[in-house]
Amino acid sequence: MVAQLQGAQLQDMGESADFVDERALRRGVDFLAHLPERMPAPFVAIGDDGSVGVEWDYAAGHLYLTFSEAEDEAYWCSSSGTDWEGVLARSIPQLVEAICKLVKDLS
């Protein structure tokens, strides 16, 4: 089912946005498909360079992910002012903590 959903989303996005980097879009959709069910829906935007930006802005903090041809990146700023940024693949522990804070914020 997840594979069918991913394929449908890619097809729909691809028809309306020819400039989207397909590999970046696939990585973004795959990432979103594996988030916890309780994770709130993000705001998604396509950058001028074809990158895919995914962001959550809640009381607990702001999480922004960029999936691009060059490198996938993550940025987090908590409500207390603690922030970090880095390459997504090397930021997994911080990313998990940020996702947990966002989900907890909505509980």
Image (cartoon, grey):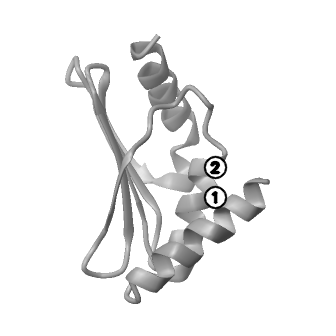
The N terminus lies in quadrant: bottom right
**Most distant residue in the top direction:** 107
Reading the image, the residue beneath label 1 is 30
Residue drawn where x is 76% and y is 61% of the image: 3
Q: Secondary structure at mark 1?
A: helix
Residue 71, how many percent across, how many down?
A: 46, 70
Give neighbour class at mark 2: few <14, some 14-19, many 20+ (Cα, 10 Å).
some
What number is the disc on residue 13?
A: none
Q: Amino acid at mark 1?
A: Asp
Residue at the spot x=47%, y=14% of the render? 104
Q: Residues within 10 Å of mark 1 (few under 14, many from 20)?
A: some
Q: Position of residue 59 (x, y in %)?
A: 26, 20
- Answer with left or right where residue 32 lies relative to residue 56: right
On screen, residue 3 above or below 46? above
Residue identifier under label 2? 33
User: Residue pushed farthest bottom?
Assistant: 18
Mark 2 touching mark 1, by CB under 8 A? yes
Secondary element type, mark 2: helix
Q: Nearer the viewer, residue 8 or 40?
A: 8
**Amino acid beneath label 2:** Ala
Q: Nearer the viewer, residue 61 or 26?
A: 26
Pick the residue in front: 8 or 48: 8
Question: What residue appears at the point 50 percent right and 37 percent down from the top-left corner?
Answer: 95
Classify 31 as above or below 80: below
Which corner quadrant of the image does residue 101 belong to?
top left
- Horizontal arrangement in the rendering, residue 80 relative to residue 96 (left or right): left
Q: Is residue 88 left or right of residue 55?
A: right
The residue that appears at 47% across and 63% down in the rendered structure is: 72
